[in-house]
Image: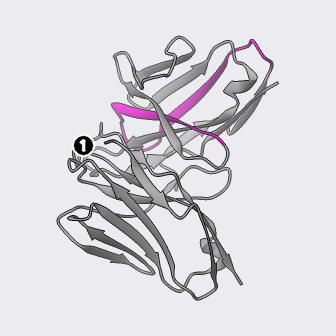
Amino acid sequence: QQQVKQSPQSLIVQKGGISIINCAYENTAFDYFPWYQQFPGKGPALLIAIRPDVSEKKEGRFTISFNKSAKQFSLHIMDSQPGDSATYFCAASIGYGGATNKLIFGTGTLLAVQP
Amino acid sequence: GAVVSQHPSWVICKSGTSVKIECRSLDFQATTMFWYRQFPKQSLMLMATSNEGSKATYEQGVEKDKFLINHASLTLSTLTVTSAHPEDSSFYICSAHRPGGGSEAFFGQGTRLTVV
């Protein structure tokens, strides 16, 4: 119930292409769904996040699509660039706005954008 | 700039010794901080929730006597790996939320621990 399943495990995209990473969850109590970007040897950094009351959120080249009925959400990276090459993690938590909310992370997707 | 800072960034220690990792919130007070462990090419696994002024809450399967957590001030939490063994070698990361900042978690840069 507390798991967040993420796919694919790795992804290779050509420069300028669209990168799509998918996540699925079971616990309907989750109310905050962030995506994190992590470069080797660094801590994760928040990329974009969404709450279940909206179906899509866009920030620059990054878009989250959220399907509440299917309990799925995905990250779309438009016009992918070599600098986007990193590991991406989806996550989920309960109790939006609280400072004590534990994040449950997906398994991660290693994205490589080829020039 | 970074809002959560960890120190050291990397450390090598001998088997059987103890290592302390610091996590500081730089421009806000954090009553709660989180400690994660990450093995190569794997996800972040929550180890424990550090609570200022009280005992840490450990996740199932995490040895609290081996991973000592102290949250003595509103800006500092420490993780001490006691009697370290090679299998404790990992990437340790802390995080904290800015008060009033919603659910966004700010992560430290991580600490690479190698036990030889």
Residue B24 position, x and y percent, is: 50, 35
Quarter of the picture holding the C terminus of chain A: bottom right
Q: How many marks?
A: 1
Residue A99 part of the magenta segment: no
Residue B112 position, x and y percent, is: 69, 38
- x 47%, y 19%: residue: B70
- x 42%, y 80%: residue: A60
Asked if residue A9 lies left or right of residue A66, the reply is right
Q: In the rendered image of this protein, does residue B94 appear above or below residue A89?
A: above
Asked if residue A69 lies left or right of residue A26, the reply is left
- x 43%, y 34%: residue: B34
Report the coloring of the rendering. Answer: one colour
Quadrant in the rendering for residue A82: bottom right
Asked if residue B12 lies left or right of residue B96, the reply is right
Q: Nearer the viewer, residue A64 or B103?
A: A64
Write down the residue under mark 1: A98
Q: Which residues are magenta?
A: B14-39
Q: Amino acid at mark 1?
A: Gly
- x 53%, y 64%: residue: A8
Asked if residue A93 lies left or right of residue A104, the reply is left
Residue A9 position, x and y percent, is: 57, 60
Q: In the rendered image of this protein, does residue B107 appear above or below residue B24?
A: below
